[in-house]
Amino acid sequence: MRDRSVAIACFAALLLATAVLSTAPAASTADHSSRRGDLVTQEIRVVSQNIAGGSHGHGVSASLDHLDMQIGVTDPQVVLVVEICINQVAEFRRRHPTWDTAFTVLRDDPRTGCAGRDARGAPVVLPSGDLRLRQGEMIASPGDLERVSRTRLTPDAKDPLRDFHLTCADVVLAGGPAANALRACVTHLRSGHPDRERFPEETERRDEIRRDQVVEIARVTGPLIDYGVHVVVGGDFNAVPWDRALDHMYRLRAKSGRPNGPGDFAESDQTDGAWFNTPGGPERSVFECPVSARECRTGEPTIGSDTKKRYDYIFFSRARTFGLHGKAGGKGDPASDHSLVRGRLPCGWQADLSCQPCTLGRGKTHETSECVVRGSSALDGGVLDRRSARNLRWR
């Protein structure tokens, strides 16, 4: 494993985030990379879902079937899963024996539902702490996962049986220009109160916990992004896009829609104009974007039947957003209550990876034997040509 300080100092990339949520696979070469002139492109593909493996799936392996189908369609390098039971993690590993996985337990009490049901259909009752009750979040990749970290986020004192973490890992991209091109993270934040109108104080308490958790995510990922490491964060955030709890994720401000917010991320569906005036849910009257807007903190709903909301996200650090599009990708059977989200990142790198000093900011440089990769992004999965490269911001 390479020294992280070298990897951070030497990879400076600016990526365009696009989310592709149709069922058609992307057209590309066998290794999803290509070369034109002095540039190399490679697609980075991400799949994320709350599979509700315990509450809806009761621990059965079939909860993975829809996720596996989408993996077959998109051939992702990164899969992010929340509410996955420990036996479902074992089943995922059985189905993907060559993949690397990182699993973090978030709870192990009977409420997980992971112990399954008995012959009469009743939930199997086990004492808290039983291994079969374990449920949490998982990162998976066909490539190696290196330097896995688990950061504990702000807890809920009223719910001590539930933990909240940000689980991250370096994803080694096969055929890519650098082993540590991507830092992938998954999380599942505090849910809100189901009856916001009747219990405003409890609602605000939970909302404050969620805001603190997002600030913690920004604290962990911010220094990496500042040094040029590209970070993707996905999972169930339990908040609508314009909720101020997500302010420290979005570069877009919720009210103005301008890219001058405190966050470092673009979300995969923030340029989909179909949702600018139809955000859905009880917040419809307080937040809408004009049809003329180019970007908006909205997106296709991923949860709900009567009142639909977007709670599930794929965030890309400091990504350019022109050409961005997204669509929710179904729930599966046995159905989760959350739709799957897919994202595709067409990334371009200079083919000449000759070693150079790396700029660390404020005029400082770091001499290293590692190769400096200066990166930018292509449009809609196409090859990054010289004309489009001139319009991209290089770091």
Image: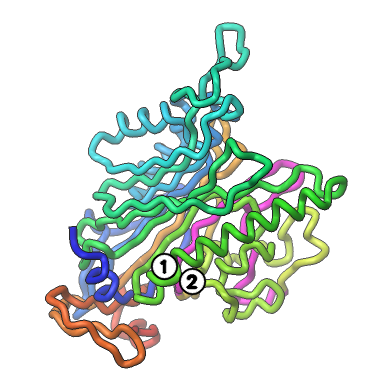
Instruction: Residue 300 in the image: state x and y as whole percent.
Output: 62, 55
Which residue is label 1 attached to? 380
Image mark for residue 323: 2
Q: Is residue 124 above or below residue 171?
A: above
Front residue of 46/119: it is 119
Which residue is pictured at 60% across the width and 17% down the height?
Answer: 123
Left or right: where does residue 192 sit relative to residue 250? right
- Viewer-side residue, 296 vs 190: 190
Q: Residue furthest top?
A: 119
| Crowd band around label 2 with a 10 angstrom C-alpha radius: few (<14), some (14–19), many (20+) | some
Q: Is residue 257 left or right of residue 24?
A: right
Q: Report x, y in % for residue 366.
A: 22, 82
Give the residue type at disc 1. Asp
**Residue 256: % across, % down:** 69, 79
* Residue 329 shows in this picture: no
Quarter of the picture holding the N terminus: bottom left
Q: Nearer the viewer, residue 381 or 347?
A: 347
Compute the Cα span from label 1 to label 2. Answer: 6 Å
- Residue 295 lies within the magenta run: yes
The prevailing secondary structure element of the residues shown in magenta is loop
Q: Examine the image and state in which quarter residue 287 appears.
A: bottom right
What residue lies at 37% left-to-right and 53% top-to-bottom? 149
The amino acid marked with disc number 2 is Gly
Look at the numbered disc 2 and give the secondary structure of its residue: loop
Can residue 69 be seen in the rendering of this structure?
yes
Q: Which residues are magenta?
A: 290-319
Q: Residue at x 53, y 61 (%)?
A: 216
